[in-house]
Image (cartoon, rainbow, N blue to C red):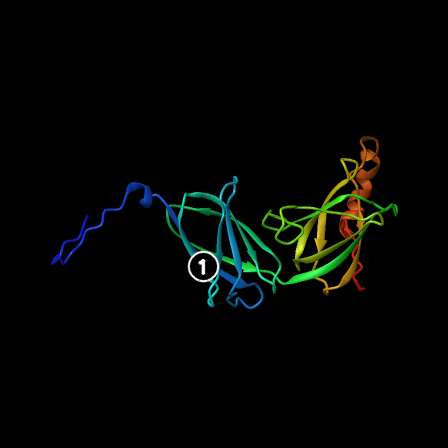
Amino acid sequence: TTAKPGDSDVEIELSPASMERATLQLRVLGQSAGEPVPQAKVRISPAGGGRWRDLITDNNGHAEAAGFDPGDYIVTIDHADFALGRERITLRRGENDVRIKLVAPVDVELRLRTTSGEVIPNASVGLKRANGELFGFPVGGQKVSEKLLQNGVVKLKRVPAEVVTLLVDRQGEVRVEQPLDLRVESGSVVDVWLNPPPSAGMVMILVAVVIVISTSGWIALRPRKS
C-alpha cells in the first residue's frame, strides 16, 4: 500500500514468503559465569551447505538476523578468550531464541601410544564434543582433523577444556574412538594410551579382559607441564 498525504493509518501487506521466514535472536555466554560475550564472530551456515551469514555480538552478547529459511543450521562462534563454539540448531518459522555457551580454551600436546607401546605416526586426529559436533583444526579452518607427527605427537590449540571423544584414524589400519578429558592446565603434555579395535581372532580372548579394563577406563592420562 502506498501512503498518501494526510493518511493517518497505513496498512502494509506482507508477502507470504516473508511470513514463512525465520528470525534468529542469539545470545552468546561464557559457560562458567554465564557472562555475555561481546564482539564474538558468529557464522551461520545451512547444515546441508550453502551461503552463510556473518554476525558480531554486541556488548550484551546479542546478535540478531532475519530472513532465514526454516531448517537446520550450524552456528560457529569465534572469540579469543574461548574455545571455538560450534552448535547445530533448528530454525522454525517466526522468532527463534537461541543461547550458546562458550567453553574455556586449552592448549595441549597429545602423545599417542597403543597399550603395547607402539607409536602411531601419521594418523588423523579429531575431537567430537558432547553435542556431536566435530571440533575443527585449525581454528576457523575447514579441516576436522590434524595429522600426528612421526613421533606420535600432535599439538592442539584452543580446544575446549571439557570431556570430548578422541577420534584416531590411520588409513583404516587403526581406528579408535574413546573418551578424552581435556580439563587440564593449558600447556600440559598428555600421554594417551589407545586400545585399537581387536581383530576377529582375538575377540573371544578379550571378552573376560574387557570387564576388568572397563572398570579402570580405556584411557590413561598423565598430564604434566611441558
Q: Position of residue 120 (x, y in %)?
A: 83, 45
> Can you say whether 44 is above or below 61 in the image?
above
Rendered location of residue 146, percent (x, y)? 72, 48
Secondary-structure class at tag 1: strand
For image coordinates 69% across by 61% down, the residue present is 106
Q: Residue at left 72%, top 53%?
A: 180
Q: Residue 131 appears at what percent x and percent y?
A: 58, 50
- Residue at 54 percent across and 60 percent down: it is 101
In the displayed structure image, the side of residue 104 where residue 1 appears, left or right = left
Q: Measuring from the top left, give residue 56's x and y in whole percent.
A: 49, 60
Check disc 1 and give the amino acid type.
Answer: Ala
Quarter of the rendering occupied by the C terminus: bottom right
Kindly identify which residue carries mark 1.
63
Instruction: Out of 212 and 70, give the one closest to the viewer.
Output: 70
99 with respect to 136 (left or right): left
Q: Looking at the image, is 73 positioned above or below residue 33?
A: above
Which residue reaches farthest left?
A: 6
* Vertical side of 53 occupied by 81: above or below: below
In the orientation shown, which residue stands out farthest toward the right?
Answer: 117
Toward the front, the furthest residue is 5
Residue drawn at (55%, 68%), measured in percent from left and top?
A: 33
